Amino acid sequence: MIIYKKSKRSTRVSEVMKSGLEDLALGVRLREYRLFQAWSSIVGETLADKVQPQRLFRDTLYLTASSTAWITELRYLKLELLEKINDFINEENFEVKDLVIHTGIVKKREKAKKKFKPRKKVLKKQELEFITNSLTGIKDPALLRTIKRAMKRSFQDRTEESKDES
């Protein structure tokens, strides 16, 4: 016979669902699926024809490139790609921090079904300088990158909100 003790605190259904999803790793698979489906919208048609995501494991995205030339190109675009990917994922507790790229067969793909449109607002030079000057004391690169991205989004959102009010 199993005896259940009554808990003094009640548990929200959302907490139970969240822990269940984490146990099944469905949240991770859903994030990976969304990223793979929108890949060409995130990186562009040309790059999507030559580079495909293979796996999202922890904070690393594994990619397959059609040639070493594309791997070299991706190394130059790494920070920009990480920013676009993280803008797409847009989750508070998750960030892709690294890309691992190897050569392999890149399968022909179907055209993207839904378009991901990155933020249109380009920050002014004055706003970028303000962000850079505000973060000069931060030494940890991961923390610096996270705060910088948050500040950029804040400026972008603030400008978009002011346009909506007009």
Image: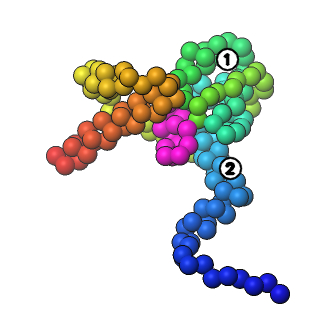
Q: What residue does disc 1 label?
A: 71
Using the image as rendered, state which of residue 159 and residue 70 is in the foreground. 159
Say few, some or many: other residues with alpha carbon within 10 Å of mark 2 (under 14 / 14 to 19 / 20 or more): some
Q: What residue does disc 2 label?
A: 29
**Residue type (three-letter) at the residue carrying disc 2:** Arg
Q: In the rendered image of this protein, does residue 117 appear above or below residue 19?
A: above
- Residue 137: where, in percent of width, then height? 38, 23
- Residue 146: where, in percent of width, then height? 46, 33
Using the image as rendered, state which of residue 76 and residue 2 is in the foreground. 2
Relative horizontal placement of residue 32, taking residue 42 as reference (left or right) = right
Using the image as rendered, state which of residue 147 and residue 104 is in the foreground. 147
- Residue 17: where, in percent of width, then height? 61, 66
The image quarter in which residue 35 lies: top right
- Name the front one of labels 1 and 2: 2
Q: Quadrant of the N terminus?
A: bottom right
Find the magenta span and give its range.
83-95
Which residue lies most toward the left here?
166
Q: Is residue 110 visible?
A: no
